[in-house]
Image (cartoon, rainbow, N blue to C red):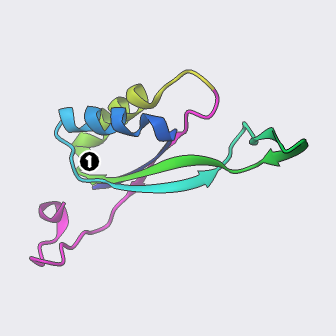
Amino acid sequence: MKKIEAIIKPFKLEEVKDALSEIGIEGMTVTEVKGFGRQKGHTEIYRGSEYTVDFLPKIKLEIVLSDNAVEEAIRVISEAARTGKIGDGKIFVLPVENVLRIRTSETGEAAV
């Protein structure tokens, strides 16, 4: 099993969710996060004063799925989240050792 963590622009969430749903992936955790990468934020003017916004709002998706579904999920996320502009985000893939569904005590892929 693998865990996909995708950092995307907030306005792309619905497109990514719908695209994942079309390939049968429905379970995910969504968190509002802030961060920056190469774009290093931007400057804004508020009441005549200029200030730097370092941390930009992002969405973090977390999905755990079987190894054979990972490549398609990555493809779908990257296509749906892409704007072609700086700050589109990143996708991380991590190994998952085990999963336990608390309600039923199922473990492994059956718990996903």
Q: For the residue labelled by badge 1, is the local secondary structure a helix, a strand or a loop?
A: helix
Residue 70 drawn at (x, y percent): 30, 42
Q: Which amino acid does label 1 sit on?
A: Asp
Q: Does the magenta stretch include residue 91?
A: yes
Q: Which residue is drawn at 82% across and 46% down?
A: 52
Kindly indicate the quadrant of the structure image that contains residue 23. top left
The residue drawn where x is 38% and y is 28% is 80
Q: Magenta stretch: residue 110 in it?
A: yes
Q: Which residue is drawn at 11% across and 73% down?
A: 106
Question: How many labels sit on residues?
Answer: 1
Q: In which quarter of the image is residue 85?
A: top right
User: Could you say where residue 107 lies in the image, as x and y percent from the top left?
Assistant: 16, 71
Quarter of the figure that contains the C terminus: bottom left
Q: Is residue 46 left or right of residue 104?
A: right
Q: Quadrant where the N terminus lies?
A: bottom left
Q: Which one is in front, 106 or 77?
A: 77
Q: Main secondary structure of the magenta part?
A: loop
**Residue 79: x %, y % from top left:** 40, 25
The crowding category of the residue bearing disc 1, from other C-alpha atoms within 10 Å (few below 14, some 14 to 19, many at least 20), is: few
Determine the residue located farthest toward the left in the rendered image: 104
Report the residue at 48% width, 26% height from top.
82
Residue at the disc numbered 1: 67
Of residues 20 and 74, the one drawn nearer to the viewer in this rendering: 20
Viewed as shown, does residue 107 lie left or right of 12? left
Residue at the extreme right: 49
| Highlighted range, magenta | 86-112
Residue 96 lies, with reference to residue 105, above or below; the image says above
Q: Which residue lies furthest to the front in this view?
A: 47
Q: In this view, does 80 lie above or below 48?
A: above
Task: Indicate the position of residue 43 as horizontal and vertical percent values.
Answer: 81, 39
